[in-house]
Amino acid sequence: MQSNPWTIEETIVAFNVYCKIPFKASSKSNATIIKYANILGRSPSALNMKVGNFGRLDPELKQQGIVGLSHGSKLEEVVWNEFHGNWDKLAYESELLIAKFSQKTIEQSTGLDIEDVKEGLDRQVLVKQRVNQSFFRLTVLSSYYFKCCISGLSIPDFLVASHIIPWSKNVEERMNPRNGICLNSIHDKAFDKGFITISPDFVVKISDAILEFEKEEAVKDFFLKFKNHKITLPDKFLPSRAFLDYHYQNIFIK
């Protein structure tokens, strides 16, 4: 394992890992930490320390009384200032670096299967889009500890990183983790269609369109039991109140 100073490329990958892992779950024995430490040729302890160093820069963690490591390098601040808020750039550039360190193509590194796409610009665009979508999903889901923020369901195949402002409505915020919430697939569909919303104070609201079916046991179990309940909040990438208000005003069926 390396003992020499961290490079800018390694630090960008460490920020990628910071986004992909629940902060309180980060440790030298965490499987994700071990995976990326091996890719970088660093010890799990060293990478875990980098993740903790990024935590000290995150104002959302500070607001919740969660404190990262007290000491860090200037390089972490440089990476934070360049990429925090520039999620599209972070996602693709960091995944390219992971592929480079892994000595793989980005398709191999990220597990993409796009053999049916022709070569050329269309392929490049599709690769970037899918890499970024995968990064967004993992970032959002990990922030909620891989549990639906309404129901608590934790079966990975049933979880969706739902966009609060739809993908098609705001290009600039497509990759912003604060424009995402972790929902199970049924609540994701209901949220997408406006049958439920989450208020800016993080409370579940049920549309009158669903209340028409309130006598059905399934409706009671899937929806009515969660009415006016507060969602489980992440420890980072808190959903934007402005984005939630947009959903309430423009998508929710009143």
Image: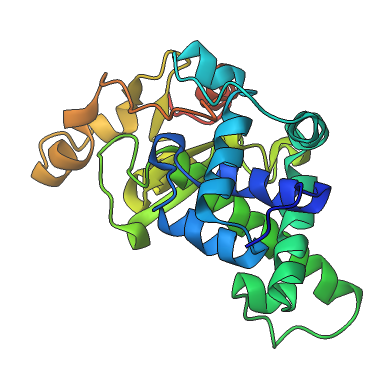
> In the rendered image, is residue 20 in sight?
no
Is residue 6 rendered to the left or right of residue 185?
A: right
Q: Residue 87 in the image: state x and y as whole percent.
A: 73, 41
Residue at 61% in and 23% down: 58
Q: Is residue 179 in sight in this rendering?
A: yes
Q: Identify the residue at horizontal 14%, vertical 36% (top origin).
A: 220
Q: What residue is shown at x 32% (from left), y 44% (from top)?
A: 147
Q: Position of residue 73 (x, y in %)?
A: 74, 31
Please give left or right for residue 23 compared with residue 212 in the image: right
187 w.r.t. 131: above or below:
above
Residue 90 at x, y percent in the picture: 75, 46
Is residue 15 positioned above or below 252 on the image? below
- Between residue 81 and residue 128, name the one nearer to us: 81
* Residue at (33, 33) in percent of width and height: 209
Q: Quadrant of residue 233?
A: top left
Using the image, determine if residue 113 lies above or below residue 216: below
> Picture coordinates of residue 153 (x, y %)?
25, 47
Rendered-image quadrant of the N terminus: bottom right
Asked if residue 105 lies left or right of residue 243, the reply is: right
